[in-house]
Amino acid sequence: MLAYSGGLDTSVILRWLIDKGYEVVAFIADVGQEEDFAAARAKALKIGAAKVLVDDLREEFVTHYIFHALKGNAVYEGRYLMGTSLARPLIAKAQVQAAQRERARFVAHGATGKGNDQVRFELAYCALDPGLRVISPWKDPEFLARFRGRTDLIEYARQKGIPVKATASKPYSEDDNLMHISHEAGVLEDPAEAAEKAVYSKTRSPMDAPDRATRVSIRFRDGLPVEVRNLSDGTVKRKPLELFTYLNALGGLNGVGRVDMVENRYVGIKSRGVYESPGAHILWAAHRDLEGIAMDKEVMHLRDMLAPKFAELIYNGFWFSPEMDFLLSAINRSQELIDGEVVVELYKGNVMPVSRSSPTSFYSKDLSSMDREGGFDQTDSAGFIRINGLRLRAHKAIIDKRGLGSYKVEE
Amino acid sequence: MLAYSGGLDTSVILRWLIDKGYEVVAFIADVGQEEDFAAARAKALKIGAAKVLVDDLREEFVTHYIFHALKGNAVYEGRYLMGTSLARPLIAKAQVQAAQRERARFVAHGATGKGNDQVRFELAYCALDPGLRVISPWKDPEFLARFRGRTDLIEYARQKGIPVKATASKPYSEDDNLMHISHEAGVLEDPAEAAEKAVYSKTRSPMDAPDRATRVSIRFRDGLPVEVRNLSDGTVKRKPLELFTYLNALGGLNGVGRVDMVENRYVGIKSRGVYESPGAHILWAAHRDLEGIAMDKEVMHLRDMLAPKFAELIYNGFWFSPEMDFLLSAINRSQELIDGEVVVELYKGNVMPVSRSSPTSFYSKDLSSMDREGGFDQTDSAGFIRINGLRLRAHKAIIDKRGLGSYKVEE
Amino acid sequence: MLAYSGGLDTSVILRWLIDKGYEVVAFIADVGQEEDFAAARAKALKIGAAKVLVDDLREEFVTHYIFHALKGNAVYEGRYLMGTSLARPLIAKAQVQAAQRERARFVAHGATGKGNDQVRFELAYCALDPGLRVISPWKDPEFLARFRGRTDLIEYARQKGIPVKATASKPYSEDDNLMHISHEAGVLEDPAEAAEKAVYSKTRSPMDAPDRATRVSIRFRDGLPVEVRNLSDGTVKRKPLELFTYLNALGGLNGVGRVDMVENRYVGIKSRGVYESPGAHILWAAHRDLEGIAMDKEVMHLRDMLAPKFAELIYNGFWFSPEMDFLLSAINRSQELIDGEVVVELYKGNVMPVSRSSPTSFYSKDLSSMDREGGFDQTDSAGFIRINGLRLRAHKAIIDKRGLGSYKVEE
Amino acid sequence: MLAYSGGLDTSVILRWLIDKGYEVVAFIADVGQEEDFAAARAKALKIGAAKVLVDDLREEFVTHYIFHALKGNAVYEGRYLMGTSLARPLIAKAQVQAAQRERARFVAHGATGKGNDQVRFELAYCALDPGLRVISPWKDPEFLARFRGRTDLIEYARQKGIPVKATASKPYSEDDNLMHISHEAGVLEDPAEAAEKAVYSKTRSPMDAPDRATRVSIRFRDGLPVEVRNLSDGTVKRKPLELFTYLNALGGLNGVGRVDMVENRYVGIKSRGVYESPGAHILWAAHRDLEGIAMDKEVMHLRDMLAPKFAELIYNGFWFSPEMDFLLSAINRSQELIDGEVVVELYKGNVMPVSRSSPTSFYSKDLSSMDREGGFDQTDSAGFIRINGLRLRAHKAIIDKRGLGSYKVEE
């Protein structure tokens, strides 16, 4: 069961596996990428696939992967929303299920041996069906010896009658799906070189975006988006896939969601990535803003400490894992009260929350028990501060006595 | 020794303290706020201050407070860069030193009893001179009974001959300094109401900002900014205060650094704050970007977990504390290799890092020992993944056996 | 609704409240302390209580408080198992429920104003019924002025005809319940003075304990103890309260569970506590040992990082709180596979796990899928290590180049 | 440069490397293990080593490895003090330095491919000299094919004239050094089987230990032990190596420091280990006890959260790493005030702190500034609690309103 994309790499792998004596089923996952699935199916069959399966995973991608990651404010190294990282375990899961249905004993993928995707695919295989054997050509010494670069692949394709696109491929690699498109490697590899405008494809440049802001209201229930309302034209979207696609369009139009960064791959290599994830950025900002009003302070501060770990697990491919179960149990609990509505302005690259309301807010006027209690007595603060200052006084007395007298901040 | 601002509240407090029999020295801290210090001095003397001290703290504010917070990526609840939180301990420190010089036995401030600033002032007093007694009128029952609102203050001022500005004050409260201006309370209190354009004063609206982007190069050494270069016009700034002030101007012009959020005060109240901190936002984004290329992955991930705590300590007023010493020791160490240069584009509210380079980068071509080692062998990944997958396989086998079979992410 | 213990303090408070015009219901919680509840009831009625309620909370204390804390390995500052901290929220909850049933509008307790218990009681009141008003005499200036020490209390008791025990009270204070007995203050206050043997009451001195070890097998299901089997004499206990009481007896006999430490109170005071919690120590050690075999590594390491926070929340009185909900959701999930059996030896103060087995263990021979996979290929380690070493090589090259060349561990 | 122990494995490896054409220097590290170093040297020369180096690392092991780990309270998975984990980076460092002196281009070791030690050796090589090439026979397919078990090694030894000890080796493997001896694998592999008494060699059984307790006073300066005083017989030790060796003897005599546990190896395998580390256990307990009195609460709670990570880094072999530098900077700072003296009782397996004093303690009577402040005002607690309860009241009101009404602890 080969995860098949229709591109040059997996087409060569498909044929190579057949040549090695495997009966190969090509598994094509539709996670929202721009692709002619009928053409890909035909191509796989032409190359010799015993069967081709095309699985539409878009709905599940949005509801169970994208929305769950956003619910936990997942962001890797401060910026990357992980469109690729989230798609991989879903594709792997569907591929494993297909393998089980078709009684395949091997699963294969075309991810390279220096990247994160290989890890994400293979850890998901481990976690979902430890009995499956993994074939990973880009880590196979024989395959690596045979195919040293793109030229070898093209040559092999020509020999085997595999169609190769006439158009020159882009001078960098991309991964496209519902949540984002990534651009990396090739001419983008040097982090000291600014990315050219032409690199971007899902978002307009902020400089070319409309001169008027678009106001959007987003409603959440239990931390998940349930309604998007365009306040400029009245459009309303409620179904997850539609809602998300709509935000992608709005965000893209307004130049929202571009990231250009150097990140740390799981395998210890630093890598420059250029990303576009317009809809996800809007939801991320709106969700975070809503938490400001609806989430308890101590829950937020604990969760914020764990959020980098949550992102790391996603990025590294531990979506299906006991430690993810552990973290997600807490995160899910934290979202039970994250209900309400946020209005954001989209404008030339900015997502600006401008107002928010929540039935679970501290501010709500019908929290009558708070009123009954008389709210806040300022003299309480005196005791609060004195008690918090107690150990600071003692500390100062001790360091003075020991002659250590200064604080680190003063050095 | 009264922290004196020249405004209505501290002027009334000054007089009230004199009436209570104290000899009062008015301490005016210049942390970069827009203020006529000569007029404030004259006013204090007129009211009856025994002495007035004006302390220019701007240089120290930039180098030891703002830059140190940015070095640790301090940001409270995901958005607030803490311009006010950082100024308070500095003012308190200078006030304590003045009290020690003048042999004052009491320190007083005019911060309210429901806010964060009272805590920041008083914890700093505790940490720096536990022997000083604190007078905090807005937590004093007698003062609170006497002054129930602004009208009482004005009435008292009239009685005592304290000049009151004729101009109507703003319908919300502000705190202004080098790093930011904050706007809160009053008409801004309802988080469901968008802030009006007129609220903002340090930044242009992104919509009114220039139509062309400004490119700025920022150079860091040990995590601290040491040079700003405007690539459009060649301006170069190197002295900390100048460099920061220049970025404030550039950022303000380009609509950078606005935040509108609901945050959690230390005293357990949620509060809506509107902030403008243009220069700090630029530095924050550039610094974070540089870390992408120059910081070790594991250091970054550990630090990211602690960064919310670092911010919480600043926000809550524990700038001078043993736990800050603890955290800062680690943070300082993490910055020793954060050297290099980041180019950012400022454009209508956006700060977009577009390129970066560092002598401590993994990418550097003269890291010849990396080359000599042959870099990366893709077949290594096979073992890496299999070993990481080992416990996932075991876990799956166990949950299947126990009939627990699903992962949390699938629920 | 007064939390009433039958002792001098709460008897005086009971009467004082009546004198202040309150109608007082005395609420007596049975959490397993040694107490003559009939006598306490009679005493309260004699003093003038409108009603006396005695609530047997022992079963709930064991199943919902003690076992849940042990499930999460709660231990404060490395040693204290929190027998007092856990009883407080339970008493407060039962008291609140009693107040609601009896339509009481005030809840009162006799905890001092310098300790942790006042916080635990009052935070639980807040969390369970914010509408109730709290009366806390030991923080009431009038009460404090009236009763400056034990002599005043005794004098008042004599005046009011409240019986005072003829026997001299102990020269330190104690808190006794099913889980532990604590001893603190008074002659124990000086941490440089060793506690005398006579202080201990629930455990024999290790030196007086039997010369032969007792072997006990403890079975857990989902992290909770479900069976204790004395391997020496065949005794078996399965009901939570019986099981726990039995372990208390065994532990006490064998000198297990003593702690003598200096701890940090929530209110910022350091305090020396001497504790005895025999049964809880045995369960703690056995549970931790079982986790060694049955818990996933990454879950354990994440949980271990959060365990101090879990303990802190319990200690500080945040048992009923959203942040406890957050943490406990994760902890509960982590315990779903903690099934199995641990054999411990109890011997003169020691609890020594000597063997353990688990149906959810990695070791289990019927994990056939692991076998099928061939287990572990040593050559995988080569790649695993090389990839983990990659960033260390780069780091070394960088620090050499920058002349920073040494590691902190070498300083 | 081969890390040589004198045992069968590294003797075979030594010869095998010579057969492969390498010129081999045997590097013998003295970390306090029981070994006849002269015999080992002679054996290596007889086998054909070009040179033999014996390096006495005991002093450095105590002062820079053992004491630093104890200073940070390092303990892996709650129990293991890491005697082996700490020795490995030291041996590797000395081996690297020897390689540099001797201009060796390869470093080799005899650790197996399924364990932790290979990782610790090789990560240290990476971190200290990335240019060195690593030879690890137990991960080399050729070596693994040649030597499938102990029989093959003995057979080869016989062929090559390598002396093999006549005595039957133990039915499990051991690692011995100054800090501990470990026993694992072989008959100990089944965690359900209790270890036999004969396994232990550095400690008496608690049951055979003296019937009288030994009182020892330990003095620390900056978190490091500087003096041990046996209160029973007046013995005093101050030099690190002597002090530590003395505590090993005392602890061993009193049955202190045994651990029997299942732990998680870095490579994802669970493993049962039986350990004896008498001196280290005494210091660990005494140091932790002293922190109770001398360490600030917030520092302790932060540090306690990071302590599992500190231990994990040591266990996994990241002793020389930037993340260790990061953590250790904070830990070192936290120890600057950890001065004072702890008295512990050693008795049949127990280490019981009974009293402690510190010049940096809160309790110290000459902290006159604390006294001057009048200490603690109980009415302060009222405000402290009300403010801490504020968000709990709000939370309760919200969950009631939303019908979510219960806390996790009640489920």
Image: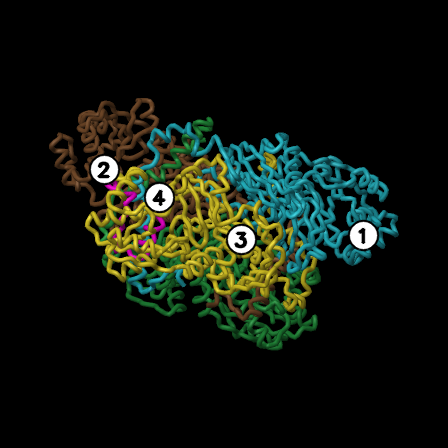
Chain colours: A green, B brown, C yellow, D cyan
Q: Name the residue under label 1.
A: D168
Residue B192 occupies quadrant: bottom left
Q: Where is residue B265 in the image (x, y as percent from the top left)?
A: 32, 46
| Chain letter of the residue beneath label 2 in the structure image | B
D260, A338: nearer the viewer: D260
Q: Mark 4 points at which residue?
A: C166
- Alpha carbon of mark 2 to alpha carbon of mark 3: how far? 54 Å
Q: What element carries label 2?
A: loop
Q: Residue at x 28, y 66 (%)?
A: A234
Residue interval drawn in magenta:
C119-143
Q: Residue at x 78, y 58 (%)?
A: D148
Instruction: Judge depth for marks 1 and 3 and give the one in front.
Output: 3
Give amino acid for label 1: Ala
A215, B79: nearer the viewer: B79
Instruction: Judge depth for marks 4 and 1 and give the one in front.
Output: 4
Q: Is mark 3 on a helix, strand or loop?
A: helix
D65, B392: nearer the viewer: D65
Give amino acid for label 2: Asp
Q: Name the residue under label 2.
A: B140
| Chain letter of the residue beneath label 3 in the structure image | C
- Tags 4 and 3 both on a single chain: yes
Q: Name the residue under label 3.
A: C251
